[in-house]
Image (cartoon, helix red, strand yellow):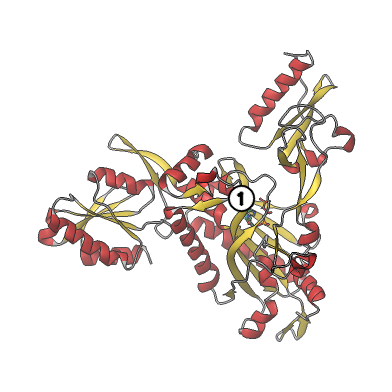
């Protein structure tokens, strides 16, 4: 298994090549917000197009939707977000650092069964090294340095007993009692609609795109010819005031989701088979766009960990540089959402199933994936460093369908007008159909390296022979092999490989 690039280098690479910038960079950035640069925006568009094609255009049972970001506030009361969309939070009273309580781990430190103190660390890339450091410091402070300790029993802070709070140190100061007890923090961003700010004008930026789909279930049934089982898909921004945004674009406060609600008969016998099918379909899609299969895995949620209304949930996990984490969730939500919206809106949302001769609120299977987490998994999967003729190069092995730039056209040299003219004519022709770059600056080898580094699958060089016989050199990014092709052959080649 190949090793991965560390996050620090990946973040620097993304900035250097124009994939991802800190939001408001010149003002020092805004924690939890990111902007996509010239290459990032292309990559993102290609991911969304690949998802939309596979989820909507290539199927007969799924239609699309684009709902507004701000919905009627009652939507979020009905869905349970106003009361329950929260994470447990603790604050360090001294440093004012804020942590998600389930991402802070503590353990008593024992010597032969005797508790000599507690350590506490925030989860992160260097957790193990931090623990070692904190244990050493604790032993020194209680004058037991160098003694052997019993095995630590790390637990998230959410599992601490109230009588333990005063004993557990803050991860920032290492002093017991500096942390507040955990309390719930609602993750929805609030805003006001209209000129007069009052309680009735409170609205929320959507924390997920899914509810916009549920509330249009009836409109879609009535306006199209869909029949259960069918899906409604949506891609759009979601906002969560995450307590500790971290790991670059993995957990941000503004992100994009690709969600689909697949409505199925409210029948216990049906959902298990369809859930299994959707997990397979989604897993295969991730592989098909170039996410490394060996870094993907499934996490089947235990029954006791499910939300009260959920029947099952399986996450597709990816081995990010900071650990194995959720990339996509595929949940079976029963008919909780439609039931709630029917109750809160007072509008009947039941579906009449002509085949079954039954009226019911359908169950739903929900594959939900973040565009940003997909993009990060793709970058990590594609990034590679190798050696070509003794020279090191960085290369992104993007699949052509996903690569931001598909083709680059170069004249061999820039000071020969006839070469430049021919290269530009070819560039203009290709540009009409595929995102193509034109580059005449520097030695040809360096131009190849620049394109390898951003994952461009093919470069076409126009040289002196091209003037005589109208053939060009097609160079492949992964093999670096070069082939001589006529213009028509080139077009045919790209048509075949970029269909
Ligand atoms: P996590 O447990 O990691 O917070 P979640 O289970 O709350 O995620 P869902 O509510 O199921 O996430 O959201 C569906 C998908 O949206 C996730 O699988 C992920 O790809 C994406 N997502 C959720 N929160 C964020 C975020 N803060 N930043 C980027 N993507 C996110």
Task: Determine which residue is flagged by label 1.
Answer: 252
Query: Which quadrant holds the C terminus?
Result: bottom left
Looking at the picture, tell me which residue is in the foreground, 31 or 410: 31
Task: State which quadrant residue 386 falls in.
Answer: top left
Most distant residue in the front direction: 196
Q: Nearer the viewer, residue 18 or 426?
A: 18
- Residue shown at 28%/43% (left/top)? 446
Label 1 lies in ligand 1 vicinity (Cβ under 8 Å): yes
Mark 1 nearby-residue class (10 Å; few <14, some 14–19, many ≥20):
many
Q: Position of residue 495 (x, y in %)?
A: 33, 67
What residue sits 12% from the left and 59% below the top?
A: 467
**Residue 292 image point, x, y percent:** 50, 49
Image height of 30 relative to 164, above or below: below
Identify the image quadrant of residue 312: bottom right
Q: Dividing the image into four equal quarters, which quarter contains ligand 1? A: bottom right
Residue 225 appears left or right of 17 = right
Q: Helix or strand or loop: what does disc 1 sit on?
A: loop
């Amino acid at each position: 298994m190949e090793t991965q690039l560390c996050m620090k280098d990946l973040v620097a690479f993304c900035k250097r090549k124009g994939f991802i910038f800190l939001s408001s960079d010149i003002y020092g950035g805004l924690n939890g917000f990111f902007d996509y640069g010239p290459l990032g925006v292309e990559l993102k568009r290609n991911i969304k197009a690949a998802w939309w094609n596979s989820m909507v255009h290539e199927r007969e049972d799924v239609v699309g939707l684009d709902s507004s970001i701000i919905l009627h506030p009652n939507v979020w009361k009905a869905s349970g977000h106003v009361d329950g969309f929260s994470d447990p939070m603790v604050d360090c009273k001294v440093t004012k650092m804020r942590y998600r309580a389930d991402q802070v781990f503590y353990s008593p430190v024992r010597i032969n069964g005797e508790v000599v103190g507690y350590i506490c660390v925030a989860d992160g890339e260097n957790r193990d090294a931090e623990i070692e450091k904190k244990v050493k410091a604790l032993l020194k402070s209680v004058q037991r340095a160098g003694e052997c300790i019993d095995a630590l029993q790390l637990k998230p802070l959410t599992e601490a007993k109230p009588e333990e709070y005063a004993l557990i140190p803050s991860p920032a100061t290492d002093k017991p009692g500096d942390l507040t007890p955990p309390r719930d923090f609602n993750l929805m961003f609030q805003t006001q609609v209209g000129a007069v700010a009052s309680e009735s004008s409170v609205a929320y930026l959507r924390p997920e795109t899914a509810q916009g789909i549920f509330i249009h279930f009836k409109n879609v049934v009535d306006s199209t010819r869909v029949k259960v089982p069918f899906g409604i898909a949506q891609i759009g921004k979601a906002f969560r005031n995450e307590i500790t945004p971290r790991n670059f674009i993995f957990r941000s406060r503004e992100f994009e989701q690709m969600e689909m609600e697949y409505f199925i008969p409210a029948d216990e016998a049906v959902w298990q088979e369809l859930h299994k099918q959707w997990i397979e379909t989604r897993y295969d899609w991730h592989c098909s766009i170039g996410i490394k299969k060996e870094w993907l895995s499934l996490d089947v949620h235990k029954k006791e960990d499910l939300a009260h209304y959920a029947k099952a949930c399986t996450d597709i996990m990816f081995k990010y540089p900071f650990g194995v984490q959720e990339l996509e969730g595929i949940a079976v939500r029963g008919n909780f959402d439609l039931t709630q919206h029917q109750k809160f809106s007072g509008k009947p949302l039941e579906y009449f199933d002509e085949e079954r001769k039954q009226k019911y609120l359908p169950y739903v299977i929900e594959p939900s994936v973040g565009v940003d987490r997909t993009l990060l998994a793709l970058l990590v999967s594609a990034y590679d460093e190798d050696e070509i003729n003794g020279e090191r190069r960085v290369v992104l092995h993007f699949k052509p369908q996903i690569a931001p730039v598909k083709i680059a056209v170069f004249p061999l040299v820039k000071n020969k007008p006839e070469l430049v003219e021919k290269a530009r004519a070819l560039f203009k022709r290709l540009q009409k159909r595929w995102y193509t770059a034109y580059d005449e600056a520097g030695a040809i080898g360096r131009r190849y390296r620049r394109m390898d580094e951003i994952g461009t699958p093919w470069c076409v060089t126009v040289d002196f022979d091209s003037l005589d016989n109208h053939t060009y050199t097609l160079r492949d990014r992964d093999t670096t092999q070069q082939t001589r092709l006529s213009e028509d052959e080139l077009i045919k080649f790209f048509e075949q490989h970029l269909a």
